[in-house]
Image: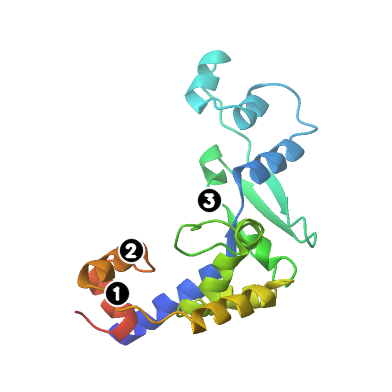
Amino acid sequence: MKHDEEKRRRMTMRHESCKQHWTQEEIKTAIDKALEDEPEGANKEYWTTDCTVQEIKEKYHTTKFKPTPLKIVLVHQCCGEKFTHVLRYKKDAKNLKDWRCLDPQCLPKQLVMPFGKFKGETLSWVYEQEPSYLAWFHETVEGCEEVKQVIRNLDGIEAHLTAFRERRRHVPQKILTPTQQQVEWLMGKFSAETIDAVCEELFGGEG
């Protein structure tokens, strides 16, 4: 039973990792597009401002206002793939996500660093700012194979990978003190996890 639950959990995580969140700017653009032909009034004001339903009722002196469901179309700018969502209230527009574009040219603009000082930044942005960091990530971090695969496909990355490997060959491996190990743990991959959660992921059991 426990094994089946864990299997379902991991499958769900892999499924979710293939999706991307739309930015609020992208969602706002889609809402504005859907309302192009909407006449000025309570419904349009509700969808395009920060007004709540109650505030709209008070402003328009009505007790019966209910926003009209809004169909929006979100588009991947890279490939033109479209995704349709129906919003019943503004809260439905938060945390919208759909399948990522899997084109190798698009992935660096969509995948984000999973942890570290650039956590949450796209690979393409990190590559522009500090390519040596991606070389370090590729050569030293265990796991994260999807991110590493995208790094390997970046134009010009091989020179940075080679330079990092050459530097590492001439640097003796340092032995970390317990305090240094604790710092690396706090700042590393499992910084937000409990001990039991880490043991479950690494060893399939409790610590």
Asked if the residue at tag 3 contacts the one at tag 2, i.e. Cβ–Cβ closer than 8 Å, the answer is: no
> Alpha-carbon distance for marks 1 and 2?
10 Å
Residue picked out by circle 1: 198
Q: Is residue 47 something that shows in the picture?
A: yes
Most foreground residue, 14 or 127:
127
Residue neighbourhood size for the residue with mark 2, other residues' Cα within 10 Å, grouped as few (<14), some (14–19), many (≥20): some
> Residue at (68%, 21%) from the top-left corner?
41
Residue picked out by circle 2: 191
Most foreground residue, 167 or 142:
167
Looking at the image, is 58 positioned above or below residue 67? Answer: above
Residue 131 at x, y = what percent? 62, 64
> Residue at (51%, 27%) from the top-left corner?
53
Residue picked out by circle 3: 95
Dividing the picture into quadrants, the one containing residue 77 is bottom right
Residue 188 at x, y = what percent? 37, 66
Name which of mark 1 and mark 2 comes first in the sequence.
2
Residue neighbourhood size for the residue with mark 1, other residues' Cα within 10 Å, grouped as few (<14), some (14–19), many (≥20): some
Q: Secondary structure at mark 3?
A: loop
> Alpha-carbon distance for marks 2 and 3?
24 Å
Most foreground residue, 167 or 55:
167
Amino acid, disc 1? Val
Residue 25 at x, y = what percent? 65, 41
Looking at the image, is 98 positioned above or below residue 10? Answer: above
Looking at the image, is 35 positioned above or below residue 59? Answer: below
> Residue at (76%, 61%) from the top-left corner?
81
Dividing the picture into quadrants, the one containing residue 116 is bottom left
Amino acid, disc 2? Ser
Q: The C terminus appears in which quarter of the rendering? A: bottom left
Label drawn at residue 119 = none
Q: The N terminus appears in which quarter of the rendering? A: bottom left
